[in-house]
Image (cartoon, helix red, strand yellow):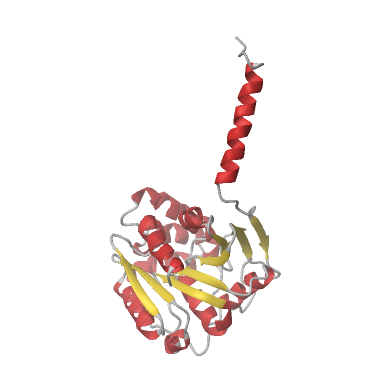
């Protein structure tokens, strides 16, 4: 039966349009996502609007590891994610390269003069090296489960099978083995274990490349006192002792550092305890 005001379907459509308009006004407007590739083949994605924040992923995964942070922060910041060389949709190494110069190329391509850097594991090493190489281009530094150039890593017997498979030419097998190593294990958020496995196995091709990344010289471990920007170091309490030591070395070595330890989190801290990770990130971004 038609309503007194006219055709029922017309009225429903009008109500839907009104609700949509209200939601559009009430919700923050997000810039449309942008993606592209730098001149040397580094793939990037940009979403959100505001102060730029760059998320730099760990070794053996790609930019998709940051989904929990993208959802939490893209309404407040311009979020830039990119794939490290040889990972995800970025080009394979074609010779000597520097990871921190790849990051500079991403920022140059996007015409971003200065940004906050968030790195995890190998991504932290890239972020630290970039800060030392281009100090005027960094606003804040967040280093999770950090790597550090020049730090002497102990022997890792649990990684031997992966490297043996890679050396034998079985890149897919190496990726599967790496996905099950302790460094990729989630301790708390077990529902995301398949996500980690998928990210690692999707990046199997990196086990076919010869390492040609050039380290920063002198190495970062000897230059931490040069870092003046506010620096947050995040560590999971289930991470390896040597990673915890790196976190301590960085926190004490930079001029303005603080350390946050997240309970029940392993090396992939942002995925293991995303709510705690995001809370630490938010607090620091609001009050560095």
**Residue depicted at x 60% and y 9%:** 1
**Residue depicted at x 58% and y 66%:** 86
Q: Can you tell which quarter of the image residue 19 is in?
A: top right
In this rendering, the answer to whether 56 lies above or below 4 is below
In this rendering, the answer to whether 23 lies above or below 284 is above
In front here: 88 or 274?
A: 274
Q: Is residue 154 visible?
A: no
Residue lying at the far top in this picture: please name it: 1
Q: Position of residue 182 (x, y in %)?
A: 34, 63
Q: Position of residue 239 (x, y in %)?
A: 32, 67
In front here: 90 or 281?
A: 281
Q: Is residue 206 visible?
A: yes
Q: Can you tell which quarter of the image residue 281 is in?
A: bottom left
Numbered-mark total: 0
Q: Quadrant of the C terminus?
A: bottom left
Residue lying at the far front in this picture: please name it: 4
**Residue depicted at x 49% and y 61%:** 61
Q: Position of residue 199 (x, y in %)?
A: 49, 56
Q: Position of residue 130 (x, y in %)?
A: 54, 79
In front here: 110 or 160?
A: 110
On the rendered structure, is 166 left or right of 89?
left
In front here: 135 or 244?
A: 135
């Amino acid at each position: 039966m038609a309503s007194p005001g006219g055709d029922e379907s017309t009225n429903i459509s009008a109500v839907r349009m009104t609700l949509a308009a209200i939601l559009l006004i009430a919700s923050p407007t997000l810039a449309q996502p942008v993606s592209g590739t730098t001149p040397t083949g580094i793939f990037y994605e940009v979403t959100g609007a505001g102060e730029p924040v760059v998320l730099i992923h760990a070794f053996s995964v790609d930019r998709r590891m940051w989904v929990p942070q993208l959802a939490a922060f893209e309404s407040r910041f311009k979020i830039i994610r990119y794939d490290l060389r040889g990972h995800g949709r970025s080009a394979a190494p074609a010779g000597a390269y520097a990871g921190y110069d790849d990051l500079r190329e991403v920022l140059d391509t996007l015409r971003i003069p200065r940004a906050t850097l968030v790195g995890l594991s190998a991504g932290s090493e890239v972020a630290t090296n970039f800060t030392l190489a281009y100090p005027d281009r960094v606003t804040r530094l967040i280093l999770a489960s950090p790597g550090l150039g020049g730090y002497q890593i102990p022997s890792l017997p649990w990684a031997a099978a992966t490297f043996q498979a890679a050396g034998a030419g079985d890149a897919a097998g190496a990726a599967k083995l790496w996905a099950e190593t302790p460094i990729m294990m989630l301790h708390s958020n077990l529902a995301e274990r398949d996500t980690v496995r998928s990210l690692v196995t999707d990046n199997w091709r990196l086990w076919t490349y010869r390492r040609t990344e050039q380290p920063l010289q002198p190495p970062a471990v000897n230059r931490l006192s040069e870092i003046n920007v506010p620096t947050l170091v995040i560590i999971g309490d289930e991470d390896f002792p040597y990673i915890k030591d790196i976190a301590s070395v960085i926190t004490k070595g930079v001029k303005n550092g603080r350390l946050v330890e997240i309970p029940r989190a392993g090396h992939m801290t942002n995925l293991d305890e995303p709510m705690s990770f995001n809370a630490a990130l938010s607090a620091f971004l609001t009050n560095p």
